Image: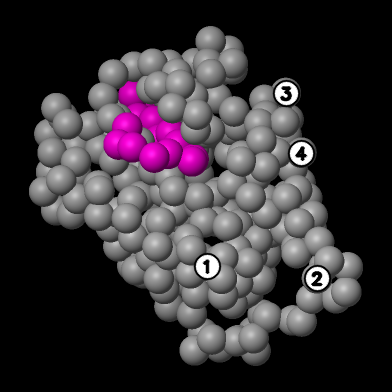
């Protein structure tokens, strides 16, 4: 089902949506890892709701740990073999998203270091990638590699999520040492705002970490910049961002 976008006003037509306030979500999972929806379904989910930009960020696990190997084996992480197809689909769906919705789709990954200890676990988003990035090695090196590739590095859900799930405290434990290697730290994930990050001087971003449709009701980032990948990533780096809670209207029916 495709809903028509509101017709652009005259000024928007002249600018071609060049500069407009946009709602964005830079942490979204597809069924290439542990999300339920396909990439085309995600594009339509956000596009029909008028979002200006999203990043698809499927998991990449560590290659040498048992947990990482098991996750790849179960299809819960991207593998090097599947990665070219992931990028190819993201590219073609980004073109469709732009044509249909004027929505910018940014290719990303969530580099996932999962340990039995919450204090050794860390998740890092890389936004604006054009090649495979490994989740192996120290987090500071990974963040450097992301930036060397011209992508944006984000510390994902760095503090207690308040949910019954694995926690990832490693980045927060090292936040002073790592403060300069990440372009932003998630100040909110899903419906949870993180006071520790909010009250810090660290650069911030708010995302849904969406795995199923109804998780679209969550904190989001608001940007006002050109609808172009480079302009959007630059706005994150320059911290020209605001945060807003997006709630799915009841009259849209139930998302699963
Ligand atoms: Zn994560
Ligand atoms: Zn995630």
* Category of crowding for the residue at label 1, using alpha-carbon neighbours closer than 10 angstroms: few (below 14), some (14–19), many (at least 20): many
Q: x, y (%) of residue 84? A: 25, 48
* 140 with respect to 35 (left or right): right
Q: Which mark is residue 248?
A: none
Q: Is residue 130 above or below residue 75?
A: above
As helix, strand or loop, the secondary structure at mark 4 comes to loop
Disc nearer the start of the sequence (1/2) = 2
Would you say 204 lies left or right of 135 here? Answer: right
Residue 252 at what x, y percent from top left? 60, 86
Q: Is residue 122 magenta?
A: yes
Residues at badges 1 and 4 in contact (C-beta under 8 Å)? no
Secondary structure of the residue carrying tag 2 is: helix
Q: For residue 240, which numbered disc appears in the image?
A: 4
Q: Earlier in the sequence, mark 3 or mark 2?
A: 2
Magenta residue span = 118-133
Measure how far apart labels 1 and 3 are at the Cα level.
35 Å
Can you identify the residue that label 1 sits on? Answer: 97
**Along the line of sight, the residue nearer the viewer: 210 or 100:** 100
- Report which residue position mark 3 lands on: 201
Q: Secondary structure at mark 1?
A: helix
| Location of mark 2 (residue) | 13
Is residue 184 at least partly visible in the picture? yes
Gap between marks 4 and 3 measured at Cα: 15 Å
Q: Nearer the viewer, residue 77 or 88?
A: 88
């Amino acid at each position: 089902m495709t809903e028509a976008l509101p017709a652009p006003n005259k000024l928007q037509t002249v600018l071609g949506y060049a500069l407009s306030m946009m709602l964005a979500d830079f942490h979204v999972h597809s069924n290439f890892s542990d999300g339920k929806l396909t990439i085309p379904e995600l594009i339509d989910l956000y596009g029909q709701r008028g979002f200006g930009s999203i990043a698809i960020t499927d998991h990449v696990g560590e290659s040498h740990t048992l947990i990482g190997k098991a996750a790849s084996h179960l299809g819960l992480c991207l593998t090097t073999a599947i990665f070219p197809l992931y990028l190819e689909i993201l590219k073609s769906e980004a073109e469709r998203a732009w044509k249909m919705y004027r929505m910018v789709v940014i290719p990303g990954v969530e580099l996932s270091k999962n340990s039995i200890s919450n204090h050794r676990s860390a998740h890092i988003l890389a936004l604006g990638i054009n090649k495979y990035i490994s989740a192996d090695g120290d987090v500071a090196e990974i963040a450097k590699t992301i930036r060397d590739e011209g992508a944006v590095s984000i510390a994902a859900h760095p503090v207690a999520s308040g949910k019954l799930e694995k926690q990832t405290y490693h980045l927060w434990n090292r936040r002073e040492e790592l403060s300069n290697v990440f372009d932003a730290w998630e100040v909110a994930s899903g419906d949870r705002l993180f006071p520790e990050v909010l009250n810090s001087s660290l650069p911030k971003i708010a995302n849904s970490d969406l795995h199923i449709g109804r998780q679209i009701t969550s904190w989001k980032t608001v940007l006002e910049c050109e609808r172009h990948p480079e302009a959007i990533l630059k706005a994150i780096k320059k911290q020209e961002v605001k945060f807003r809670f997006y709630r799915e209207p009841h009259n849209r029916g139930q998302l699963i």
